[in-house]
Amino acid sequence: MSIENPTTVYIETGKFCYIGNFKVEIISYLGCFSDVNYFKVIIHEDDNNNDSNDDINHNSSNSLGLLRIGEVDGRLKQELDLRSKFGNQRMVSDLLLYKRFSVDISLSPTPIETNINAEVDGEAITDLPSYSEDESKTNTNVEVDGEAITDSPTDSPKDSEDNSSENSDKIVSSKKDSPPLNNINQTSKITLEKENLEQTDSIISEENEDNSSEYLEEEYYPEKEIGGSLSGTKLIFLSKFPQEEETLAYWLQQEHTLEECLLTASQLCQFFRQITKEKWYFVNLLPQFIKQTDIIEFFDLTGAYQSNETVNTGFISKYSPPEILSNPPHEICEQMSSYIVGLILYEALHKQLPPASEGIIDLTKNIDIIIKKIPRIFQILQISLSIHPEERFNLSYLLELLITTRKYLANPKVRWEIANRSTLGLSTKRLNNEDNYGILQPSASNTESLVLAVVADGMGGMSQGDVASKTAVESILETSIPEDLTTSEKRTQWLFSLVEKANKSVYEKVKNGGTTISLALVVGRNLNIAHVGDSRIYLIRKGIMCQISEDHSLVAMLVANGDITYEESLVHPNRSVLMKSLGSNPRIRDDYVQDLSHFGDEFLSFKIQQEDILILCSDGIWNLLSNQELVEIFNQEKDLQTAVNQTVEKVIENGADDNATIVALKCHLEDYSL
């Protein structure tokens, strides 16, 4: 049922009124920034048009809203101009309503106790204070380096002084150590008399989501209760309100990875750069009015100024550049926006803003202590937060730095600790070591690190088993490395080609010879394998060992079919019989070689993590040592070569009835953890 707009609307805390076609309950006054007054409200979505000011029936579907009232020619008018250019983007929130009203505002300065209870989507909420800084949610579909940019939570606005006249922007100062907002008189009454305004009766867009929000915990106490004159014609904006835990203000106080911090800073920089193309520049940010989830969304754009504007002296905000405080007032420039991006990145990393003296942050003092010593990030913050605008990055270059730094940190330099050992063993039947192994690690400082490890076990009982394994390993290590190994598919395809080449070489060179083959390739941090036979590849991560290769043997097949148990396989008389090997036929089938896809169709590679250990070994190792014994050796011994030596010595102590070979690789990443 449509709601008829009343001529006069009374807004009183804890009561409701109709603004346009919206039934609104005023919850709290958030304060004033510049010439805009902020109110937290509940938007009631029910069909009962009750014109009285009685207590509201909370059984309807409700959502939190943000009500803003400002001067007709002030910051809200400027926001409308900006929205006309960028309001269709996903990073700018929709307005539910914007209208011009004749407003009569009164707030009593006498603090009183309040106890306002309401419901949002059926859940009881208690009135809590929140900041009133000027920042908006944006609904902008933006990408950084091909990735969708995500939302970020917002900070709370600061207290303000009302020093301006009815038709001009106000200069406000933030007050430290403000008393709680819920001690402010909540019996404020605002009389709104509707005026006709051409082309301002329409709702900009319908709400797409029902976003119920919690109140912001931060508090704001204005020096004067209402910005601008207390009566006259005003612009009124109504929009949804972000949930507290989804705001940039909340996000900034949580722990995040470096990549997440850089991604959020990149999103802000991306949007700032976009509006800069139209000569709009952010000189202030209110994180409590910015949503931070998947896509950053601004609910308030009053912090953006046009290039032909000036910011008056005395404009103070903890998310404003220091030159705004100086005399005479500076013209707007994009380096002011770069400064804000730097502040957000700093706070995300340090969980606090840099120390300021008289409102000005000067990083030239004790800079090595103030900024965490993280290469690249250190330089970005030092330059972005310079007190001299001309020394800061422009937004395009800053965005490029943020993106490349995030990529760099996502793919840190890898250093491999490598250890290996092979033994003939103690068997009188094996006077030649039929195992062979090799490691290929080209050195190129300007490319991703690459390491290729191979273990081959010549098949005992066949002629020239040692020649077969040596031939296979040599054919692999002599192959040139392709320049383009950028995807899992390309790396797996290359490994398969190495196995095919090794098979052909063994078949042509060794009569009646055969060998197993196990290959592990790590490019950057991406692990791919190729495997035939019963040598094994293990991955030890955080003290837990996993076998990532399959045994192509008779007993493994019997266990898989349920014919015997795993325990029975350990003593089975045919445990050395292989189902697959290299050298028996001139060609091998496409499905003959195992990769990592047996973990799932989407798995062709694993991402290597800090201190992961890869182990490649012949059956002479794992036949005489259980998985538990093997992992305990590597968990207890920090030095990799010592662990390898202990493994082989343990095998010899247990009889070493076969040749035994082990190659171990331990990953060390550049550590930029916070």
Image (spheres, helix red, strand yellow):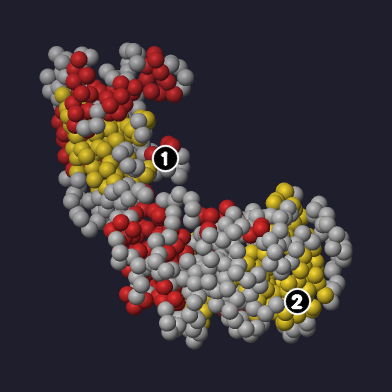
* Residue positioned 50% across, 81% down in the render: 312
What is the C-alpha distance between the residues marked 1 and 2? 70 Å
User: Which residue is found at the position 41% from the left and 51% from the top?
Assistant: 257
Residue at 20% over, 55% down? 445
Q: Give the mark nearer the N terminus: 1 vs 2.
A: 2
Query: Residue 284 location, x and y as percent?
Result: 50, 71
Viewer-proximal residue among 420 and 90:
90
Q: Quadrant of residue 648?
A: top left
Q: Residue at x 53, y 60 (%)?
A: 177
Amino acid tagged 2: Asp
The nearer-to-camera label among 1 and 2 is 2
Say which residue label 1 marks.
Answer: 597
- The quarter of the image holding the N terminus is bottom right
Report the residue marked by disc 2: 104
Residue 178 shows in the view = yes
Q: Are marks 1 and 2 in contact (CB under 8 Å)?
A: no
Front residue (pair 634, 340): 340
Residue 326 located left or right of residue 117 = left
Above or below: residue 492 compared with residue 562: below
Task: Name the image quarter holding residue 438.
Answer: top left
Q: SS class of the residue under badge 2?
A: strand
Q: Position of residue 315 (x, y in %)?
A: 50, 75
> What is the count of numbered marks?
2
Of 529 and 296, nearer the camera is: 296
Relative to 484, 147 lies left or right? right
Q: Position of residue 161 (x, y in %)?
A: 58, 73
Q: Is residue 62 left or right of residue 223?
A: right
Of residues 230 and 670, the one drawn nearer to the viewer in this rendering: 230
Q: Is residue 619 visible?
A: no
The amino acid pointed to by label 1 is: Ser
Q: Is residue 418 above or below residue 401?
A: above
